[in-house]
Image (spheres, rainbow, N blue to C red):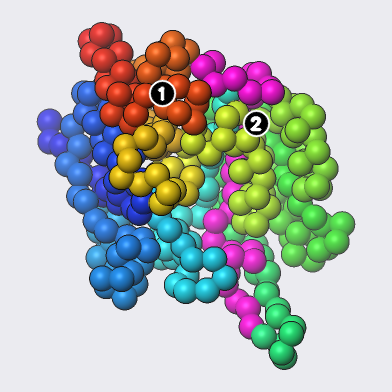
Amino acid sequence: MAKREVVLIPGDGIGPEVAGAATQVVAAAGVEIDWVELEAGAEVAVKYGTPLPDTVVTEVRRVGVALKGPVGTPIGGGFASPNVALRKALDLYAAVRPCQSLRGVPTRYENVNLVMLRENTEDLYSGIEHLVQPGIAESIKIVTERACMRISRYAFELARREGRPKVTAVHKANIMKISDGLFLECARRVARNYSEIQYEELIVDNVCMQLVTDPTRYSVLLMGNLYGDIVSDLCAGLVGGLGVVPGANIGDNAAVFEAVHGSAPDIAGKGVANPTAIILSACQMLDYLEERQAAARIRHAVDEVLVEKKHTTRDLGGSANTREYTDAIIEKLRGES
């Protein structure tokens, strides 16, 4: 059987370390991947004048699947986010981020099992902004029927496929009656075709309060780009933080799976980074490639290592380095075979 091609974008900072851990774990699970390694991120911008060289977009479009480490983006100036640019170039309209409790990661909550689904291509992230006059800036929020319909369909199809009972549309239509109103109108139209799935609508600030009160009441959270960006990090905090949460950006013709945390330049090269997020993102990728058995085995191995607490990284209360933690997961995988 021929190897599957997957683009690998290690990224900046700790990216190459955690991405390397993920590729080792995938190999240990018995999935043969022909990794097409490409550069993107802040460090690449120095060499090529752009953080996202055209070859990256071209190759991801050709191959159809990529695994990406974290990349750096300047705040308040410099170049535009390569993450946003990649999503726009490939029309990766669905940001899919599962947030599930991990047995070995103690948190304030138990039995959290929800999926954040964020429209990825428009809203305030359209990047249309300007100075009206000195001291007055304006950003324009773009909301289209096309984008709202397809992300709503994705949400309900995901709920149906995974046996999830409810979709919650998150909005601020009490204030933004036209733009968020269109979002809700589209979600309602789609919901009518999925009578077996409960549908509800909640204002975004109320959702934030409810999430920190009882996150187990939610299953699929459907929202626009800005709300999704903010609330998805809140949800990550419910299950242990960005270091243990996977992420995917999926379109009709391509998908990029990535760790959603930052590049952590302060610990880059020290070999202490936690690769859990990108390893679990690789599991999402394997599910997408229909290698579900391998994905399940990796998740089980990660769970066992976290529960045992003998080889966990410092951010999870242990003392293991990246390699020791990765080796422990690989050892669990080998023990199953």
Residue occupying image coordinates x 47% and y 70%: 80
Nearer the observer, 244 or 293: 244
Residue occupying image coordinates x 25% and y 45%: 6
Q: Residues within 10 Å of mark 2 (few under 14, many from 20)?
A: many
Residue occupying image coordinates x 42% and y 49%: 266
Q: Pick out the residue farthest to the right.
A: 174
Magenta segment range? Answer: 103-130
Residue 217, quarter of picture? top right
Task: Locate residue 132 relative to residue 256 in the image: left or right.
Answer: right
Task: Locate residue 36 relative to residue 169 in the image: left or right.
Answer: left
User: Is 105 contained in the magenta span?
Assistant: yes
- Give SS at disc 2: helix
State whether residue 270 appears in this view. yes
Residue occupying image coordinates x 65% and y 50%: 230
Which residue is the site of mark 2? Answer: 238
Q: Is residue 317 above or below residue 66?
A: above
Residue type marked 2: Leu
Q: CA distance from mark 1 to mark 2?
A: 23 Å
How far from the left and from the top, in percent, is residue 287? 38, 31
* Residue 319 numbered mark, or none: 1
User: Is 151 contained in the magenta span?
Assistant: no
Image quarter (top left, top right, bottom left or bottom right) of the C terminus = top left
* Residue 147 numbered mark, or none: none
